Image (cartoon, coloured by chain):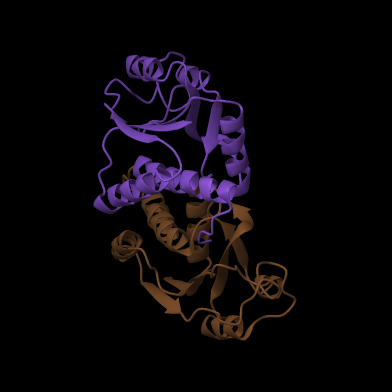
Chain colours: A purple, B brown
Amino acid sequence: MRIRLIGEGKTKGLQLRALEADYKARIERFTDVVVEEAPPDRAATGSSRGGSGEKVSSAERRLLEKVSGSYKVFLDAGGREWTSEEFARWLGGQALRGTRELAFLVGGPQGFSAAFKKQADLLLALSRMTLTRDWARALLLEQIYRGFTILRGYPYAK
Amino acid sequence: MRIRLIGEGKTKGLQLRALEADYKARIERFTDVVVEEAPPDRAATGSSRGGSGEKVSSAERRLLEKVSGSYKVFLDAGGREWTSEEFARWLGGQALRGTRELAFLVGGPQGFSAAFKKQADLLLALSRMTLTRDWARALLLEQIYRGFTILRGYPYAK
């Protein structure tokens, strides 16, 4: 099962970039993982994004084309909240079900349009608190790595 | 209002240490902030810690002495979950109420004993997911900084 993380824009903070690279390398011990940067959605405005948009933007359409055929998880503060153990169980379930690719999408500062969110197989929240996309990417990779260590019964810090 | 963060043990990851220092410096633009490292609780075991302990350990007693007189917030995955806006409003409310010091305590790998948790004025969860103490400290400082930017109406990345 391939893990794919697509984030809008470039991770700016040096430390969070380093953390991303670190956890990506750790996930590679368990499975294939790809981290991609999608061009930021320049057309995004308050009205067309941030949960209220009625229409999928052109940048969102391009994202959808990239992940057609994948199981699509969009990060959204209003999405489902799991403990790390529940998330790990879900990861394991996807692998058992024969999912070829899990695509995690992290939006830009305005979030995703409501119309776009309807295309997700799962809306996932890492926290009720607002996370910058840089934090969200790094923490998501950390939780994916943690998920694999839980599934394999590896020791890992709490 | 002084912000005090006391974490058990030393932050190990270089990047998370750097993030901590970065957000601490940013919070200093708004208010006094102190970050302290408490010695890890060597006596902690699965039975005496991790939410099931009936007795406050000696390390926990030393922590309590440090923060007597402060408003005590313990980080706990089972604690209250707020959005960043709700957290900011709470921060602002504490300042208005004349709280002299807000003390945030981040536990070690085993968490705090149930008896110790009863001493908290607030149990706060950053996420339902398990965070290492290093992640919890850095993310907490980020959210405190974010809280001040929300209260002051400063622009800050989402």
In this rendering, the answer to whether B94 lies above or below A77 is: below
In this rendering, the answer to whether B101 lies above or below A64 is: below
The residue sitting at 38% across, 68% down in the picture is B12
Q: Quadrant of the C terminus of chain B?
A: top left
Q: Is residue A130 visible?
A: no
Q: Quadrant of residue A91?
A: top right
In the rendered image, residue B69, in percent from the top left (x then y), is placed at 56, 81
Q: Quadrant of residue B19?
A: bottom left
In the rendered image, residue B105, in percent from the top left (x then y), is placed at 52, 70
Picture mark count = 0
In this rendering, the answer to whether B35 lies above or below A28 is: below
Q: Is residue B62 left or right of residue B10?
A: right
Q: Is residue B115 left or right of residue A13?
A: right
Tell which of A142 and B63 is nearer to you.
Answer: A142
The residue sitting at 48% across, 81% down in the picture is B39
Tell which of B150 and A134 is nearer to you.
Answer: A134
In the rendered image, residue B86, in percent from the top left (x then y), is placed at 53, 49
Q: Quadrant of residue B51?
A: bottom right
The residue sitting at 61% across, 64% down in the picture is B122
